Amino acid sequence: MDRVTDFFAAHVLGTVLATCLVLLVLGTGYGARRGLLQKELRHFFYSPIAYVVTAGFLFINGFVFLFVVDYYRSGSPNDPPVRLFFGNGFWWIMILIVVPAITMRLFAQEKASGTIEPLLTAPVREGEVVVAKYLASFYFYCFLWLPTLIFVFLLYKYADPTLTLDRLTDGTKLYTLTGWQEVYGRLNKVMDLGPILTGYLGTLAMGAAFLGIGCLTSSLARDQVVAYILGFVALLFLFSVGFLDSIVQTDPSWFPGLKKTIQYVSFMEHFKHFPLGIVDTRPLVYYGTIIVITLFLSARVLESRKWRG
Amino acid sequence: MLSVRDLTKWYGATLALDRVSFEVGAGEIVGFLGPNGAGKTTAMRIVTGFIPASSGTALVDGRDVFKESLVTRANIGYLPENVPLYLDLRVEEYLHFRAKLKGVARRTRRLQVASAMDRCFISDVSRKLIGQLSKGYRQRVGLADTLLGSPKLLILDEPTVGLDPNQVRQVRRLVKELGRDHTILLSTHILPEVEMTCDRVIIIHRGRIVAEDRMHELKERMRDSQTIYVEIRGEGRLPQDAMTAVTGVTGVQSEKTADGVYVLHVRAQPETDIREALARAFFERGFVVREMRTVAPSLEEVFVRVTAGEADAAAGRGAGAESGRHAAVGTGAGPGTGPGPGPGAGPGRDKVESG
């Protein structure tokens, strides 16, 4: 690869990732300033349902992991393993089901129980409330994925180091590093760590966008069930738009850019490259846009009581 | 402290508030009274900045509640109707969260929460989940919350609804005590509550203020007749002619309670004292007077008078019957439990109100 573009790409990517991180830190500070974030996290972790969901989530992921490992033992598959773990059918179904379940509570419950009234008559801005609630749901989502790191550990522990991926990278030079980089290097010797990291990155980034949509639907609904169904339908639509791509063979004359548009909107399309170890900035920007828009709209919906008749 | 001018609120095509204007001076406890659905909650929501008015202004300490919402909200402690709380948090936890939310500095937060819990008598349940608390305790948790951040103005929307008589007394006493260093606007449809706690009353009906005055002045204005409670005992039938013999009597309601004992509610013209003449008249006819007293016109009567004549009067009567029950347990300072203008089917009646 061209050194210049390589350098440039690395910097663009670095900037995007660093921006995400800075935003996350700033948002956390913003949400925690008035104790709102802590309160939302409490709601999540005080509920026994949270642990039931986590357990179920881990259980299904465990099956997927088992399946992937078994698949590799029994033959020489064409797909890279991470591609099988992130982005498989189970993975999509789990995210589509779990994300609206995380977010349905956020506003709908406060509205149904009336707690929204003391909350919004306290000296806080709607934006602070939205950001805190959204971040809490994001942290809970991260918490759901956290136990799956066990799988990485299991691979590290039991994979045969003689079958390393050294042949894919000329390792020796890379691994003369110290500190955490050495740990990374050691891990990387046993397995291809890059795609694993990007797989997680994609999962979290895409989940973040989904949570934004769930947040918006919860702010629209007064009832948790309605919030869930609205959120689920919205996510299902954005996901299944991807199937249209294979149905639509050629652009119809009345919509020249249809195929392209479908690809732009489709979440399937955007996620495709993450488990391959490729971090494309376009999906990250897409996710970021969705988050900003949905959170902005959620805040407007909360404020709408002020200008609706 | 609080100044409301020409407040009007439309919900779609429904007029909830119609040019409502009133003032609440610093240090006052003002009762906001009205039948269900009169617009009390709407008015309070506007003042607390939860919803805006269609027109008109509300100023807290001279600042507009809509234009300088954040500043005015910090000056208001608000207890919404039915006291919505997070049931999955502990009392202490909830109050700490609320204190932080209201911008109470970290140094004083612990102290403020502790003192708020102390004042509302909930220190003993500070480690309990709010969801496990009884209604009375929850009410007091809500009240403790309003104190955090030391707001100058407390707005309490039906602070005693759904409580048992003992709890009602506790909350009432608490409100009275809080009135020493806060300005309080409190809404209710329970009349004795207002009579006992408030300096001034505003009666609102169908979105309009129909009466507003100091308590005794209001009663004074409404006094175009007086009622005297009499209990007599004697042989024979009730001496109707004893009443007609006394000048000034305009009507009488009688009831035989036991053998030879009658309870009478004698209505007379105002500004006259007929008690002695009445006692003499009974005595001359062989009846002894066991008890006799003037019944002050209760706020209940005032209330029904200004809001009656329409469908909502039923709600007023219902509330009246309820008030009778409370007063019976009451504090002694209670209003005459006497001739309610028509005892409604008190018990078993549940409150339904929105907006």
Image (cartoon, grey):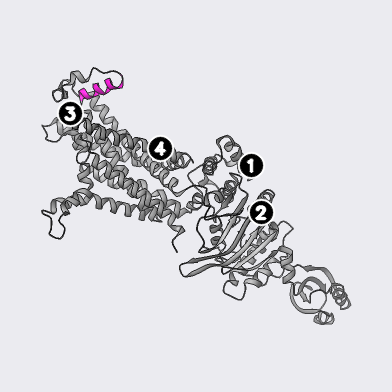
Q: Earlier in the sequence, mark 4 or mark 3?
A: 3
Q: Chain of mark 1?
A: B
Q: Magenta region: which residues?
A: A179-190
For the residues labelled 3 and 2, say whether their Cβ atoms are less than 8 Å apart: no
Residue at the front extreme, as displayed: A4
Which secondary structure, mark 3? helix
Nearer-the-camera pick, B248 or A4: A4
Q: Which residue is mark 3?
A: A3
- Labels 3 and 2 in the same subunit: no
Is residue A186 one of those drawn in magenta?
yes
x, y (%) of residue A193? 23, 28
Nearer-the-camera pick, A60 or B89: B89
Give how far apart the Cα atoms at labels 1 and 4 are.
37 Å
Give how far apart the Cα atoms at labels 2 and 1 are.
16 Å
- Residue type of the residue flagged with mark 4: Leu
Residue B118: give its label. Answer: 1
Give how far apart the Cα atoms at labels 4 and 3 are.
34 Å
- Residue type of the residue flagged with mark 1: Asp
For the residues labelled 4 and 3, say whether their Cβ atoms are less than 8 Å apart: no
Residue B264 visible in rendering: no
For the residues labelled 2 and 1, say whether their Cβ atoms are less than 8 Å apart: no
Residue drawn at 39 percent across, 53 percent down: A219
Closest to the camera, between mark 1 and mark 3, is 3
Residue B330 left/right relative to A200: right
Q: Chain of mark 3?
A: A
Residue B236 visible in rendering: yes
Closest to the camera, between mark 3 and mark 2, is 3
Q: Chain of mark 2?
A: B
Q: Which residue is mark 4?
A: A26
Number of numbered discs overlaid on the protein picture: 4
- Labels 1 and 4 in the same subunit: no
Q: Which residue is mark 2?
A: B172
